Amino acid sequence: MTSHDVTSRVGARSREQVESALARLEYIGDTPFEPSHAREGALDGYRWALGHGRLAPITASVASGPEGPCPAQLGAERQAAQVRHLDLRLDAEVREYARGVHDAIAWVSGRSDVQP
């Protein structure tokens, strides 16, 4: 492990913390009969925050660099996810996916202590 690995941050969390949260959520999985849209949203939120996907899960904005989005992009995506989650005109599945994205990015950004 290099010193870069130790000090690398994703939002307010260490890269190691976010990678661990992603791995835990991937491991937990869903029951075969009840897929969770919120879990899928959280997975996509973590992956985007870590730089594993160039496009944001809600806004489809491009991450600022190969390491992932900058703090301002994290904040904008979190807000967009919250707006979508609260929009009662949207299907419940879409709102739950957005809630998952919001919760993951809120935790990554230090806006929440609750890890999805």
Image (cartoon, grey):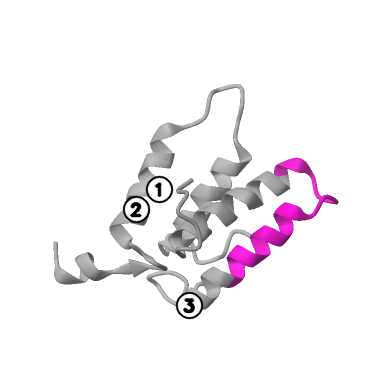
Rate crowding at label 1 as few (under 14), some (14 to 19) or many (20 or more) other CA atoms within 10 Å: many
Per the image, label 3 sits on a secondary structure element best described as loop
Per the image, the residue denoted by label 3 is 64
What range is drawn magenta here? 76-93
Q: Is residue 28 above or below residue 59?
A: above
Per the image, the residue denoted by label 1 is 22
Q: Residue at 72% of width from left, 47% of height from top? A: 94
**Left or right: 113, with 8 as reference point:** right
Q: Is residue 33 above or below residue 85?
A: above
In this view of the protein, can residue 61 be seen by the observer?
A: no
> Magenta span: helix, strand or loop, mainly?
helix
**Left or right: 11, with 15 as reference point:** right
Per the image, label 2 sits on a secondary structure element best described as helix
Task: From the top left corner, tell me how far across and down residue 50 is, in percent.
Answer: 40, 62
Q: Which mark is residue 44?
A: none
Q: Which mark is residue 19?
A: 2
Q: Amino acid at mark 2?
A: Glu
Task: From the top left corner, tell me how far across and down residue 18 is, in percent.
Answer: 37, 55
Per the image, label 1 sits on a secondary structure element best described as helix
Q: Are marks 2 and 1 in contact (CB under 8 Å)?
A: yes
Q: Are marks 3 and 2 in contact (CB under 8 Å)?
A: no
Disc 3 to disc 1, C-alpha distance? 21 Å
Q: Amino acid at mark 1?
A: Leu
Name the residue nearer the viewer: 64 or 79. Answer: 79
The answer to which quarter of the image holds residue 81 is: bottom right
